[in-house]
Image (tube, rainbow, N blue to C red):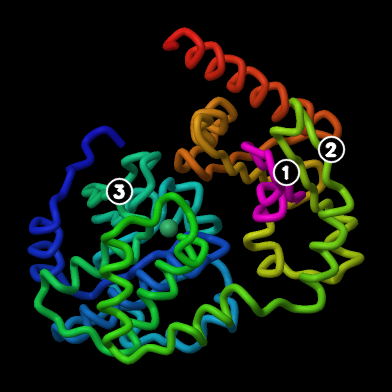
Amino acid sequence: MNNCLSFSLADTCSFLKEHDNYIILTHASPDGDTLGSAFALSLALSSLGKNAWVLCPDQIPSKFNYFAKQCGTEPKGNATVISVDVADLKLLGKLMNVYADKIELAIDHHISNSHFAKRLYLDSSAAAACECVYWMIIELGVSITKTMADALFTGIATDTGCFKYSNTTPKTHIIASKLMECGIDAAAINKLMFDTKSRARMEIERMALESAQFYFNDKCCVVCATLNMQQSSGCSEADLEGLSVLSNCVEGVLIGVTMIETEKNTFKISLRAYSPYNASAICAKLGGGGHIAAAGCKITGELPQAKEQILSFIKQHMEEVDAGSDSCK
Ligand SMILES: [Mn+2]
């Protein structure tokens, strides 16, 4: 949408104070950040005496139960619809058609946000949408409860890979320290989010590692999780989250590619890139988007052709970037 208003933090907080009866949309295949920002915001709105309801296109994984609890009632009739951590309408999954033209305010941190809402609060320097919501809660003058802090910390920890990724800033750590002062058990949250996996997840990791192949002088690693592999490991969709870490943890790899078959011959591609390469630039050419260090897109076709296609775009990007950096010397 072209007439999307850019909102400052102050604009956003005025909007939140002026309206009521909120539906807060998360993206499909919900992660810690979209859920953390949605539930923390719903609690903050509720402490201002407002009604807020979190609506997720897919089932919420039970590991988030410690904070993902509704605090309001489902709005009937006129609701104020907000989205959090949603970069594009497509990411609303099965709720896309219902809410496409009804989103009053989007709160996001993706530089690729497609300006689909009527108003947009975008802070692309924030590591997580939960950072944005943290500043909103402060600006609204709401005191942060332990459950809000659990939710926000989870989103920040998960979107930064436990404070490891390059999106982690001094501000990220300052916010995390403030959240720790609210009495959360950060170690327990981190263990649950990063050091606990299902048996099926371990199986799918083993198979994905077996599929690993290296390209372009071993600077690029591709791992796959086909439908066959998913079925024989018994893994669920939630078990596939964060699988992309396998492709970029190898010494010398600057571009890691994870190909997850979501339906027959349709692959969800997760790209992780290290300097000087740009994951978002590669995925944009395939109709996707994201951040410089992490982006995604979708490719249809048989696995070998799909792989060939993503590899050809990676090769082109590497050549362009390598030529550019040479000419600067
Ligand atoms: Mn996020």
The crowd level at tag 3 (other Cα within 10 Å; few <14, some 14-19, many 20+) is some
- Which of the two discs, 3 and 1, labels the residue nearer the N terminus? 3
User: Dot 2 corresponds to which residue?
Assistant: 303
Pointer 3 residue: 125
Tell me the distance, in whole angstroms, between the alpha carbons under discs 3 and 1. Answer: 29 Å
Whichever of callouts 2 and 1 sits on the residue coming sooner in the sequence is: 1
* 229 sits to left or right of 194: right
Secondary structure, mark 3, is loop
Residue 179 shown in magenta? no
Crowding near the residue tagged with mark 1, few <14, some 14–19, many ≥20 C-alpha atoms within 10 Å: many
Give me the residue at 61% from left, 16% from top.
319
- Tell whether 329 sits left or right of 101: right
Mark 2 → mark 1, Cα distance in angstroms: 8 Å
The quadrant the C terminus occupies is top left
User: Between disc 2 and disc 3, whose residue precedes?
Assistant: 3
The residue under label 1 is 267
- Give the amino acid at mark 1: Phe
In the picture shown, does residue 302 fall above or below 164?
Answer: above
What's the residue type where badge 2 is placed?
A: Leu
**Amino acid at pointer 3:** Ser
- Residue displayed at 52% across by 62% down: 161
Q: For the residues labelled 2 and 1, say whether their Cβ atoms are less than 8 Å apart.
A: yes
Q: Which residues are magenta?
A: 244-261
Q: Secondary structure at mark 2?
A: helix
